[in-house]
Image (cartoon, rainbow, N blue to C red):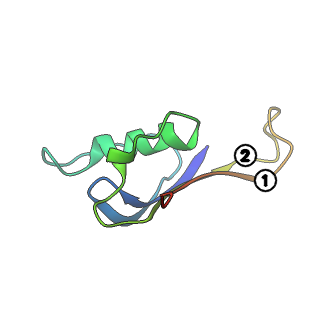
Amino acid sequence: MLVSLHVKNLALIQETEVEFGRGLNILTGETGAGKSILIGSVNLALGARFDREMLRQGAESALVELMFTCCEEDRFCGRSCRSWRFLWRRRRC
């Protein structure tokens, strides 16, 4: 189960962390609030292609981190926690 999402310097997001609880979690907000950016950041951490235009203006690097947890009785997972991390740094020419 996805437990938390940490995003830094991605598009309009300077830094934020979202924690998810058991059961159904719903992202709501006004147009332009960043819901699609949060969903897109999950895709980045899982291997989607990163475009430099996604980097927050003036930032040198971006970070997306996902934290997953599995119950001990879960037959698919032997560990209690796993995390995936995506870090992009701008190259200087």
Outermost residue, front direction? 93
Is 69 placed left or right of 91 in the picture?
A: right
Q: CA distance from mark 1 to mark 2?
A: 5 Å
| Cβ atoms at labels 1 and 2 below 8 Å apart | yes
| Image quadrant occupied by the N terminus | top right
Secondary element at tag 2: loop
Give the residue at mark 1. Answer: 80
The mark nearer the N terminus, 1 or 2, is 2
Question: Label 2: how many residues lie within 10 Å, few (<14), some (14-19) or many (20+)?
Answer: some
Give the residue at mark 2. Answer: 70
Q: Amino acid at mark 2?
A: Cys
Is 85 placed left or right of 8 in the picture?
A: right
**Disc assigned to residue 63:** none
Q: Residue at x 39, y 46 (%)?
A: 52
Q: Is residue 14 visible?
A: yes
Q: Position of residue 3 (x, y in %)?
A: 57, 53
Q: Amino acid at mark 1?
A: Ser
Secondary element at tag 1: loop
Q: Residue at x 82, y 42 (%)?
A: 73
Q: Position of residue 79 (x, y in %)?
A: 83, 49
Q: Residue at x 28, y 61 (%)?
A: 57
